[in-house]
Image (tube, rainbow, N blue to C red):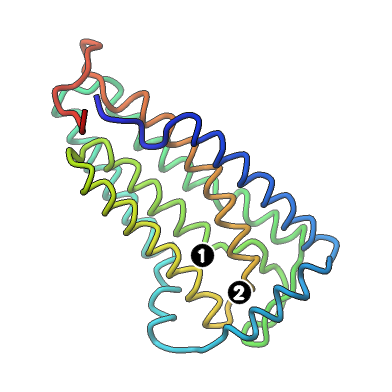
Amino acid sequence: MPDSPIPPRRSLALSTAAAVVFTLVTWQVAVDGPLLDADERAGREFVRRGWLAELFADLGGVPVAVPVLLVVAVGTAWRARARGVRQWWLPGVVAVGAMALVPLVVVPLKELTDRGGTAVTPGTGFYPSGHTATAAVAYGCAALLVLPWLRGRRGRRWLVGGCLAVNLGVGAGLVRQGYHWPLDVVGSWCLAVLLLTAVAGVVSRSSCRTSAGTPSRRSGPS
């Protein structure tokens, strides 16, 4: 039976830290606190528009990120069903459900906080970043669905590292292009961590047992 995508203790620590940081950042945005001054200064310094930053920023768009998740969800579900995994459909459904929750959480927060945009994108409703949350949840869930099927630790590390690199690139691209302030991105990463730890728990419990209730012969590193 493969290792859990995120060990329980680490999952609890990650979700707790994410909740604390998200609460602090959201509070500062809501009350226009002093942290926003430092955030906006850093954001203005970081803006350097270019094609590479735009490319990474676009990876957070729904037309790019969501199809990736759907393809992975269908592919891993098909493979699990073929291998006789019990509840082969559950991890994919939970992952897609987590993706569906993103706009249901992000949009009301944008309206409640009503944060102003940058000089490049004036207006309000910029916290948290929808593109950042979409990318983090879509690519993060896709990685969680694939992890149990990888046999070697090296492959797992490459997958997790690649997922983190893409999401860092999306966040940096959005700030570098002047589409969002840094804290808009940080807030969305925190939201994504909360959703991803929940998905990881479902994947670890349901994707690795056969219909007979025994561990699948397809297993990761022992």
Kind of element beneath mark 2:
loop
Quarter of the figure with the C terminus: top left
Image check: 51 left or right of 214? right
Q: Residue at x 61, y 74 (%)?
A: 180
Q: Quarter of the image holding residue 178?
A: bottom right
- The part of the image, by quadrant, that contains residue 75 is top left
Q: Which residue is mark 2?
A: 180
Q: Is residue 51 above or below residue 71?
A: below
At label 2, the amino acid type is His
In percent of width and height, residue 58 lies at 42, 73
Task: Give above or below for 184 relative to 52.
Answer: above
Left or right: 142, with 80 as reference point: right
Look at the numbered disc 1 and give the secondary structure of its residue: helix
**Which of marks 2 and 1 precedes in the sequence?**
1
Q: Residues within 10 Å of mark 1 (few under 14, many from 20)?
A: many
Check the image and report above or below for 205 versus 55: above
Q: Are marks 1 and 2 in contact (CB under 8 Å)?
A: yes
Q: Quadrant of the N terminus?
A: top left
Q: Which kind of residue does numbered mark 1 sit on?
A: His
Residue positioned 49% across, 36% down in the render: 10
Name the mark on residue 153.
none
Q: Residues within 10 Å of mark 2 (few under 14, many from 20)?
A: many
Q: CA distance from mark 1 to mark 2?
A: 10 Å
Question: What residue is pinned by disc 1?
Answer: 131
- From the top left corner, tell me how far across and down residue 110 is, in percent: 69, 61
Percent of width and height locating residue 12: 55, 33
Q: In this rendering, which labeled residue sits more in front, label 1 or label 2? A: 2
